[in-house]
Amino acid sequence: MQPSPPIPYSADLETLDANEQAAIDDITESMLYIIGKTHEDLGHAQRSVHAKSHALLEATVTVNDALTPELRQGIFAEPGRTYPAIIRISTIPGDPLRDSVSLPRGLALKLFGVDGARLPESLEDNTQDFLFASAPAFAAPDAAGFAKNLKLISRTTDRIEWAKSALSWILRPIVNGLEAMGADAGALKAMGGYPETHPLGERYFTQVPSRFGDYVAKLDIVPRSESFRALTDLRLDLSEGPDVLREAVANVLSAQGGEWTLRAQLCRNLETQPIEDASVVWPEEDSPYLDIAIIRVAPQTSWSEGRSRAVDDGLTFRPWRGVEAHRPLGSVMRARRHVYPIAAGRRAELTGCPMHEPRSRPNLP
């Protein structure tokens, strides 16, 4: 059966909550607390979320040649167009924990040389940022839920690391058992029960919708090359050291490159694919993810202190840095619009180095 036609984008797809600003203020408070606490402990201003990076990569993103009209949208409108890009793979917490504390991962993608009418927050830029995570939907439905979750994370920042590691060791087999029975184990994964998977074999999701030219979509990234697909079912021994994930990525990318497929899931039914509830997984049987581009990574040094200074300390990734054709949508994205620049500004104050968005992809050390 053919899927329904995609829903046309219009501004009235969003519904603002009267209490949203209070939630945004709470998120801001928690993020600033995490940044301040980790700076106090480590002498270095970390991100309030996704502090620990596992890979910092130079990449290219090439738009597929044969896209249907409904997929030839926004920055994907020109067949064969290639964008230089930077990729940052990370783990969610705001403190850089040992990898034995097994938590969900994230992938941030920054494209350079992007044309089109800009969002107000990035009028002088020519980049497009997309943020992905290793779960199909966000952990909270809206900004208020986001605020509650982040407050809990802030309270556990800087708490005893060995206890977090022990809890993670206990939770992982429970998560495996629940998922084998088809149960949702998302909450336990977020507490430290995330499977010991290889970051290059993961599937990553934007989780929340954005405008997709004339339509609305969520995006995902899946392994394409055999070098990455072979890692999908691989389990790592996270007890082997503090940076097992970083080393596992380095072992692959120092010798060979790889490819991911970037895909779009168009919104075709607002009842099953809501805009404002970010916790809902959009059903793929009604609207499958469709290929739109190939992300290529050549063999390279995947992480170094120099790369960390250039990307972890020198770049920011924000969903509101981009073009109007990919405007973020929904309560969670509206919260990010206000909060992320404040958090980045605080980090810049603590490091004494203001952040400037580059016009072209930097050559990473």
Image: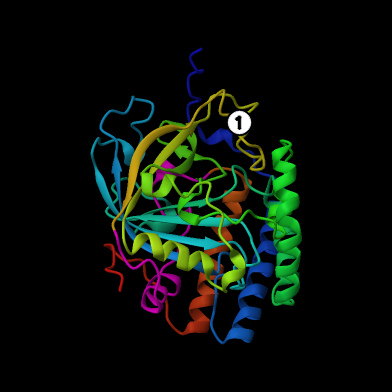
x, y percent for residue 172? 70, 55
Q: Which residues are magenta?
A: 299-328
Determine whether 321 is above or below 15 in the image. Answer: below
The secondary structure that most of the magenta stretch takes on is loop
Compared across the picture, whether 334 is left or right of 177 comes to left
Tell me if I can see residue 144 in this picture: no
Q: Secondary structure at mark 1?
A: loop
Give the camera-side residue of 334 and 47: 47
Compared across the picture, whether 354 is left or right of 180 comes to left
Displayed quadrant of residue 293: top left
Tell me if I can see residue 169 in this picture: yes
Give the camera-side residue of 296 and 352: 296
The quadrant of the rendering that contains the C terminus is bottom left
Give the camera-side residue of 203 and 66: 203
300 part of magenta stretch: yes
Q: Report the residue at 67% width, 62% height from top.
A: 27
Compared across the picture, whether 278 is left or right of 185 comes to left
252 part of magenta stretch: no
Q: Name the outermost residue toward the top.
A: 1
Q: To which residue does mark 1 refer?
A: 273
Q: Residues within 10 Å of mark 1 (few under 14, many from 20)?
A: many
Residue type, numbered disc 1: Gln
Query: How many discs appear?
Result: 1
x, y percent for residue 338? 57, 59
Colour scheme of the rendered structure: rainbow
x, y percent for residue 13? 57, 33
Q: Report the residue at 50% width, 32% height from top.
A: 10
x, y percent for residue 147? 71, 58
